[in-house]
Amino acid sequence: MLRGLVSPRPVWKIALITTAAIVLAFGLAIGLPSLIGQSPELLAAEIAQNSPDVIAALGGDEVETVKVLSIEDNMATVVVAGKMGGIVNALVDLYTKVVTQAVSGPQLTDQEKDKAINIATAYPGVQELLDRGAVIDLVLPMYVTFSGINQETGEVEEFTETWAQMWINLGNKQWGVQVDIIRDKVVSITG
């Protein structure tokens, strides 16, 4: 009896609900990634790789390798290597998303890199890691500054040398190996 008096749901309500669902889905698809964000390491690497300051410090060279060394208080220390062998140390502000400092570092020749690898692989601690399946990820130059007494004058002088810093990866663990390529020895392994 009442069947004839009840009207079907109005079409405008269905259209409104459908439109609201589409707008919500679209908003989540666009807004959710920016709310979640990418990892700080990925963000730092991307900012450094695309920075005009870093590319200028590389002398216009193309970026080959980007390595995030540390992140502290929204500041990331990133090493960028160019295809022609140039190295740039970049300080990335993750809050403002800019490179605040890009400094060209020391360079290693291919022979010096090979020498560092040979010295490191002869070291028992490194060899043990390699035997367990670790791989040498990156070999970078590093400045080492120390003080010493000049034997002729008796005065304290500062000396700067270029050593090699290697990164060795095994699974999700990483070790840093400092190699003195002048004195042919591994100075430290940290990890």
Image (spheres, rainbow, N blue to C red):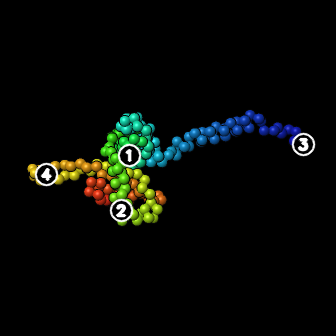
Q: CA distance from mark 3 to mark 1?
A: 81 Å
Q: Quadrant of residue 2?
A: top right
* Location of residue 27 in the rendering, given as x and y in whole percent from the top left corner: 60, 39
- Secondary structure under tag 2 reads helix
Q: Quadrant of residue 94?
A: top left
Which residue is pictured at 68% across the width and 36% down the height? Answer: 19
Identify residue for label 3: 1
Q: Are marks 2 and 4 in contact (CB under 8 Å)?
A: no
| Mark 4 neighbour density, 10 Å: few (under 14) some (14–19) many (20 or more) | few
Q: Earlier in the sequence, mark 3 or mark 1?
A: 3
Amino acid carrying mark 1 in the image: Val
* Location of residue 12 in the rendering, given as x and y in whole percent from the top left corner: 74, 34
**29 or 84: nearer the eye?**
84
Identify residue for label 1: 79
Q: Earlier in the sequence, mark 3 or mark 2?
A: 3
Q: CA distance from mark 4 to mark 1?
A: 34 Å
Identify residue for label 4: 150
Amino acid carrying mark 3 in the image: Met
Q: Are marks 1 and 2 in contact (CB under 8 Å)?
A: no
Which residue is pictured at 52% across the width and 42% down the height? Answer: 34
Q: What is the number of the mark on residue 122?
A: 2
